[in-house]
Image: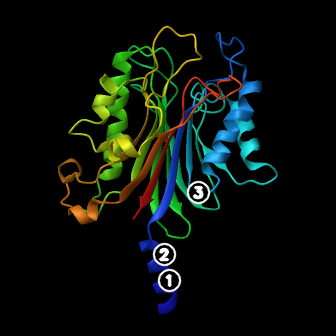
Amino acid sequence: MSPQRYLVLTMKSMDPLPIRLLTHNIRYATNSPFKGEEVWRIRKSRLIAELRFSTRHCAESFICLQEVLQEQLHDILSGLNGDMTTWAYVGVGRDDGCQAGEYSPILYQPSVWQLQSYETIWLSKTPDRPSKSWDAASFRILTIGVFQHRHSKKVVIAMNTHLDDQGSKSRIEAAKIILGRVSQFMTKPDGSTAPPIFLAGDFNSEPDQEAYEAVTSEESPMRDLQDMVSEDQRYGDRKTFTGFGYERSPPKRIDFLFLNHQKLAAFTKTRTSANEAQRWSVEGYGILANQFDDGVYCSDHRAVVGDLLLF
């Protein structure tokens, strides 16, 4: 490699990389909609328009979705791609590890990100196969993708999940499994800085409840992206679950974006300076509307968006 070529590549790797993260529980395509809920055929164009508009000017975006059935995944990819194959995904159906049941997919643009590896683990006592444990009502999964930016060569580890809505015990145990996987990525045998990691999803846990408290505890390497943005700089509503307008319970915040906080030498068993540790810079945070003038809810959840710079 010529010195000039090496210099260009080095400069590219040093430039901050803008990334947009979006997580949204899109509500599965049910044949028995709740009061106030439209069927997927009506909702899908609004949901796809949201995703397209929100990522149009950032090709480095990652879209993390929950409650996605196979037909919905097909519709979303078709809507985003049109006649081109711009977007792809990693993820499997949780019921059989193939196409059955809900996905928690991670969508990305292969022309921008090279997929290095991916996996799905079940949040149970047997994480290598479709299963549920403790008091979980449904199979629950964690989708993981390791991506390298094609131009800058920066690596990002993406995680997406949907915790159980019924079992408190299963949520706390699932959080432990997820943090264990994060720890594996952050523990570098050579003592080098851990890779940037983000965790997205519907945790069915409010900030004062078990799963959220575990993920954001002092011992955890993860931090709530919202807390990295001052309140007067946040966009949109504060709650992420709304229902379809006829629920008895009030809206609540259960959908989150988390980033690994690299000031954690004790957690990773390495000694890392503060300057080395700062890999993320959070530029913005917002919660998007899920209902407009026509009264149709695109989902019973609102999308959560975070804008980052990766150094």
Q: Which mark's residue is nearer the viewer, 3 or 1? A: 3
Picture coordinates of residue 298, whole percent (x, y): 65, 28
- Label 3 amino acid? Cys
Q: Is disc 2 placed on a helix, strand or loop?
A: helix
* Drawn side of residue 207 relative to residue 297, left or right: left
The residue that disc 2 covers is: 12
Q: Residue at x 35, y 44 (%)?
A: 182
Label 3 Cα crowd, 10 Å radius (few <14 / some 14-19 / many 20+): few
Q: How far is the residue under mark 3 from the one under mark 1?
A: 22 Å
The residue located at (61%, 31%) in the rendering is 93
Q: Mark 2–mark 3 contact, CB under 8 Å?
A: no
Answer with left or right where residue 130 lies relative to residue 14: right
Q: Nearer the viewer, residue 111 or 177?
A: 111
User: Is tag 3's residue or tag 1's residue first in the polypeptide sequence?
Assistant: 1
In the figure, residue 72 lies in which quadrant? top right
Q: Total label count?
A: 3
Q: Quadrant of residue 181?
A: top left
Residue at which label 1 appears: 8
Q: Secondary structure at mark 3?
A: loop
Asked if marks 2 and 1 touch (Cβ < 8 Å), the reply is: yes
Report the residue at 68% width, 27% height from top.
293
Q: Establish if 29 lies above or below 279.
A: above
The three-letter code of the residue at mark 2 reads Lys
Locate the C terminus and report the quarter of the image it occupies. Answer: bottom left
In space, the residues marked 2 and 3 are separated at their CA atoms by 17 Å
Q: Is residue 1 visible?
A: no
Q: What is the three-letter code of the residue carrying label 1?
A: Val
Marker disc for residue 58: 3
10 Å neighbourhood of mark 2: few (<14), some, or many (≥20)? some
